Amino acid sequence: MFKVTFASLLIETLQSLFQQGVRVKEVVKYLDHLAFKSLNIIVVCVSFAAAVTILEASFHMKLVLHDDSLVPGFASMLIVRELAVVVMSLLLAAKIGAGIAAEVGQMKISEQIDALKLLGINPFNYLVLPRLVACLIAGVLLSLIANAVCLLTAALVTTWSLDQSMAFFMTAFRRFVLMKDLGFSLIKGALFCGIIPLVSCYYGMTCEPGAGGVGRATTKSVVSSSICIIVLDFILTLVFSSFY
């Protein structure tokens, strides 16, 4: 019977990368499924998140400081450093994490993973590695897109609601946001999305028999991935803050 721990899954997956390489066709397939087919959900959600950020920041600054001229700058900094990448990653954890856990879990209880081992196929290289590489690439690409959509939405809401020009928003953006902010955001996106397939494949490979077992594995994968993303965001924020 196939058994695995999270540590052994991580080690075996990394070893298979150097020993057997990665199957490019599988990575491209999963990249299309994980990244581009999730793009519409991400665009809609991060747009509304950016709009709410602008409106709430303006309300509270007017309430306390009686001036909301700093909203574009502070909102841009929050969007690039935290909002876009975290919202994007949590959405992917819910959407693709559940799917990966269910797919791998079904393979586990139907003994397809044991069959792979009998055929001499490394299940970590076959199942985990292509999804991991695809998610790492998707994390970078989707972080760029989420940041761009968030900033565009924030600029439009600023122009519409705060009666400030687009030029004013861009000036505030350049003063508050540094190039390394974008770099750190891309690093976060890659690491956050890299967590999802590792956690999801682990729960899929350790799920209990039956439909209930697959359901519990799916739920655990989404919850655990979300918690890991939030905790890792806290750690990375502390680390990155030392570079300012």
Image (spheres, rainbow, N blue to C red):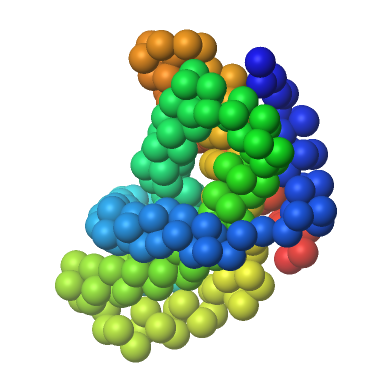
- Residue 156 is left or right of residue 126, and the answer is left
Q: Using the rendered image of the protein, determine whether residue 83 is visible from the camera's viewpoint.
A: no
- Residue 96: image quadrant is top left
- Residue drawn at point x = 58 percent, y = 53 percent: 130
Depth order, front residue of 14/50: 14
Q: Is residue 214 above or below residue 169?
A: above
Identified at 66% across, 21% down, the residue is 2
In this picture, residue 216 sits left or right of residue 22: left
User: Could you tell me which residue is drawn at 49 percent across and 18 percent down?
Assistant: 109
Query: In which quadrant will I find the C terminus?
Result: bottom right
Rendered location of residue 82, percent (x, y): 52, 55
Above or below, 216 relative to 53: above
Rendered residue at 61%/45% (across/down): 126
Whether residue 153 appears in this view of the structure is: yes
97 horizontally vs 47: left or right: right
Q: Residue furthest bottom?
A: 167
16 sits to left or right of 105 = right
The quarter of the picture where residue 38 lies is: bottom left
